[in-house]
Amino acid sequence: MEPIVAMEFVERTMKNNKDIVGVIFIMTIDQTKLSTSNTPFAMIDDYTVIKGEKEILFTMHTVFRVVEIKQIAENSRLWEVQLTIIDDNDPQLSTLTNRIKEEVRGSTGWHRMGQLMLNVGHFNQVEELYQELLKNASTDSDRAHIYHQLGTLQHQQGKYPEVAKFYEKSLEIKRKTLPEDDVSLTATYSNIGGVYKNMGEYSKALEFYEKSLKIYEISLPPNHPDLATSYNNIATTYYAMGEYLKALEFYEKALRIRAISLPPNHPLLVTSYNNIGEVYRNMGEYSKTLEFSEKALKIKEISLPPNHPDLATSYSNIGGVHDSMGEYSKALSYLEKSLIIKQKSFPSTHP
């Protein structure tokens, strides 16, 4: 579409509603980077009702990489997002897509759809889906799975009494027919542990997390990502209890597995590095904190656009560590980097 036409659409809408923020997407299409086996876009000048707008129709699976997000100086309510088109052969996209497919598991297409909707936060829609699936469930296995997923849904929304109810229903059904070391019990044990952790009942949380871990250690290969998740759950509980050495032990176990089993730009590696860095910060070992914080930052700088707010958070955290070490010039440098991104990424009224 012609830039002037796009701007007219945005400005007209913003004029009618002062609470709206306008976003202009500028898409760069480098045809040399597209596979010859697909046609991700088409010019539709000859078919559109309004001629002269130079409209382009994209296929539904078209993917863009975010290059830059910036506020337009002349208008604090108007933002510009620079995008560049990529195809299915892009290495980063392929790696992350394959990992997402592994994470969205389920015995049926409906179950996989429900998991995907949970992952992207479509809570109302996924609750409707699971309630409908529950009505039509024909086996105990299906009912146990759906109750578990409903518990996960409530967990993500912080509705802990409802969480416990659904997880316990799922566990009750599973234990009728399954041996105590069956791997399908692990997710329910882990999630019940998560409920207790969020309620501050850490000893109960550890009890259920350790039940899950015991089964995983028997049934999974030593570098399986689910083992890393289990170690990470136990670590976060020890961290909340202030037992930093125990937390560090389990965070490091999780990191060792993730470094082997995940793509090098996976966000869970960032999480592991940040978690370990935070433990060292609480122990006053600032040089170790910097080591792991900088590893997390390196991944973010590769995988995120230059003005992404998560980069600002990393720069701010590293600046804070340098400040604690008395390295004030370095602290100032990182804090200024953080401020520059925040000024570009947030409106002037943002706290």
Image (spheres, grey):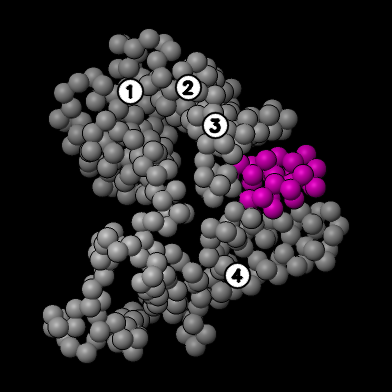
Q: Nearer the viewer, mark 4 or mark 3?
A: 3
Which region is colored magenta?
271-297
Give the quarter of the figure containing the C terminus: bottom right
Numbered label attached to residue 220: 2
- Mark 4: secondary structure: helix
Give how far across and how far down residue 338 sits, in percent: 65, 66
Q: Amino acid at mark 3?
A: Ala
Specify the quadrant of the image occupied by residue 62: bottom left
Residue 273 magenta: yes
- Mark 2: secondary structure: loop
Q: Nearer the viewer, residue 111 or 82?
A: 82
Numbered label attached to residue 228: 3
Q: Nearer the viewer, residue 162 or 47?
A: 47
Horizontal side of residue 152 vs 71, given as left or right: left
Precedes in sequence: disc 3 or disc 1: 1
Precedes in sequence: disc 2 or disc 3: 2
Q: Nearer the viewer, mark 2 or mark 3?
A: 2
Precedes in sequence: disc 1 or disc 4: 1
Residue 178 magenta: no
Numbered label attached to residue 341: 4
Tell me, yes or no, whether the two marked residues, 3 and 1, touch with CB atoms within 8 Å.
no
Q: Residue at x 41, y 25 (%)?
A: 188
Name above or below for residue 92 compared with residue 14: above
Name above or below for residue 328 compared with residue 196: below
Name above or below for residue 300 compared with residue 141: below
Q: Residue at x 56, y 68 (%)?
A: 307
